Image (cartoon, grey):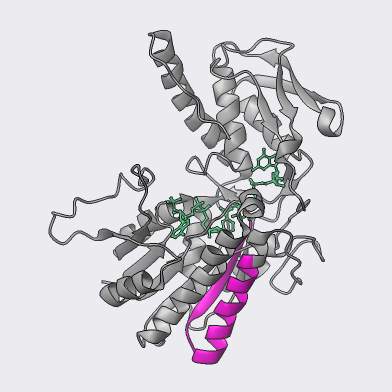
């Protein structure tokens, strides 16, 4: 039985990857952070009571800022594959907490690679690094591929740039099977609520159910190549099953704007919107509504406004990936379109919003968390 160790197992990708590897028959170990509340919601459905004998999904307390902890876990598990998905992964937050982001995202990667070396696991343990299209930042070529030069535009992207190169360097210096997946944005109903797609699907669902009246967004012109996390974790595993370690771009090859994602999400909730105004004055107004799915909305309501607080000191305006290498060398093709993904996310968030609306109707207080 192969053993995998996943950092960031409680995150979006970590949870899908853990499911995927368990289905493949792996013993899966994950690192979770200590928090004052349970933070395992995304993996609770696959969690096994530690009292059960031969459990094959095992969680360890740990942190990417703690070398001795990482070495101990690595020594205990002796993994065949390490997937380094743990990160302070929010670009906007990285401007607020640049040093912490560097510590976790850059130094955390170094600590894991050093643990492999320190324990003499160079020939046994394969290493996957969660690299990112944010490395391209101010894009030098459209679409972006493995050979496109990098120009990172945030403390997050700069930290991930270090992680990218240290993985390459440990491959070249010590022969470690280390590779980078340069993944473009990927989303799902498990996406963190403050990333733009989930902020939109959740906000629209709450508005449809009358729990909120307005959604505030930043740069609506930003263009992204959005795929589904399930397709992308499959690729993470495929990258570690090759004879030779290589880096791959993972993307769909299509891009849409934040504005278009708003329109699509609203349609999925039975709301038609029209955009007017420019820059910080831009709004989305309801022009038609299906009151079965959106009883909280009427024609003429302004449901989206721009708030400059969500603008970033340096923005990445456009990203579009070219996944030809992954298609040709690994036979990987994304199976879920952005339209299907958006419909899935809205349906999921509408389900939750309906539950909250029902509780509210029966007199229970419902607080909607906001950024
Ligand atoms: P999430 O933000 O959903 O998950 C991040 C995970 O990292 C969580 O499990 C989080 O724990 C954990 N984590 C954060 N800080 C630490 C720390 N100090 N020590 C240990 N673990 C920590 O990210 P995604 O699942 O979306 O992304 C996975 C990886 O892929 C990340 O590295 C991200 O930067 C990268 N990436 C993501 C893309 C995307 O579009 N999703 C695209 C390209 C790259 P907790 O649950 O406790 O917060
Ligand atoms: P990104 O994702 O920065 O690409 O990083 P995010 O969803 O945060 O932003 C995408 C684009 O939308 C614009 N935007 C907003 N973003 C947020 N979060 N909130 C808003 O209100 C808002 N309004 C507009 C942003 O400015 C941006 O242009 C994600 C993360 O998963 C990274 O970890 C990963 O490396 C990259 O994707 C690829």
Q: Quadrant of residue 156?
A: bottom right
> Is residue 2 rendered to the left or right of residue 352?
left
Which residues, given as a range, are shown in magenta?
159-184
Give the image location of residue 277, x and y in percent: 86, 26
Instruction: Provide the major secondary structure of the magenta segment.
Output: helix
One can see residue 154 in this view: yes
Q: Is residue 184 left or right of residue 153?
A: left
Taking depth in this image into account, of 74 and 251 the one nearest to the observer is 74
Q: How far from the left and from the top, in percent, is residue 327?
A: 61, 66
Residue 221 percent location from the top left of the image: 79, 41
Q: Is residue 205 shown in magenta?
A: no
Q: Is residue 289 above or below residue 59?
A: above
Q: In the image, residue 103 lies at what x, y percent?
A: 54, 66
Can you tell which quarter of the image residue 80 is in? bottom left
Q: Residue at x 41, y 20 (%)?
A: 355
**Residue found at x 61% / y 20%:** 270
Is 160 in the magenta? yes
Residue 59's place in the image compared with 36, above or below, is: below
């Amino acid at each position: 039985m192969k053993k995998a160790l996943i950092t960031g197992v409680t995150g979006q990708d970590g949870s899908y990857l853990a499911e995927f590897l368990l289905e493949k028959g792996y013993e899966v170990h994950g690192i979770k952070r200590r928090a004052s509340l349970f933070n395992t919601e995304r993996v609770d459905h696959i969690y096994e009571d530690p009292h059960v004998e031969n459990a094959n999904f095992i969680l360890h307390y740990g942190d990417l800022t703690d070398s001795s902890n990482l070495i101990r876990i690595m020594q205990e598990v002796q993994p065949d594959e390490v997937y380094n998905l743990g990160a302070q992964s929010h670009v906007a937050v990285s401007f607020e907490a640049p040093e912490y982001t560097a510590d976790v995202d850059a130094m955390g990667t170094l600590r894991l690679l050093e643990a492999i070396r320190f324990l003499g696991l160079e020939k046994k343990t394969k290493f996957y690094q969660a690299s990112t299209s944010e490395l391209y930042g101010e894009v030098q070529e459209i679409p972006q591929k493995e050979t496109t030069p990098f120009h990172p535009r945030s403390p997050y992207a700069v930290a991930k740039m270090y992680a990218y190169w240290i993985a390459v360097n440990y491959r070249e210096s010590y022969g470690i099977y280390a590779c980078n997946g340069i993944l473009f944005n990927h989303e799902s109903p498990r996406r963190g609520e403050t990333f733009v797609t989930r902020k939109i699907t959740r906000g629209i669902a709450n508005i449809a159910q009358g729990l909120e009246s307005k959604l505030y967004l930043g740069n609506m012109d930003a263009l992204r190549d959005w795929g589904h996390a399930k397709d992308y974790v499959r690729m993470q595993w495929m990258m570690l099953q090759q004879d030779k370690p290589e880096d791959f771009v993972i993307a769909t090859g299509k891009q849409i704007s934040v504005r278009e994602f708003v329109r699509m999400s609203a349609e999925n909730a039975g709301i038609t919107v029209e955009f007017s105004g420019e820059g910080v004055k831009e709004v989305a107004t309801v022009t038609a509504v299906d009151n079965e799915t959106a009883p909280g909305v009427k024609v003429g309501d302004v449901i989206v406004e721009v708030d400059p607080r969500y603008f970033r000191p340096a923005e990445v305006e456009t990203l579009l990936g070219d996944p030809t290498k992954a298609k040709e060398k690994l036979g990987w093709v994304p199976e879920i379109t952005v339209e299907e993904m958006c419909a899935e996310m809205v349906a999921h968030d509408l389900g939750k919003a309906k539950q909250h609306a029902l509780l509210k109707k029966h007199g229970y207080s419902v607080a909607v968390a906001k950024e």
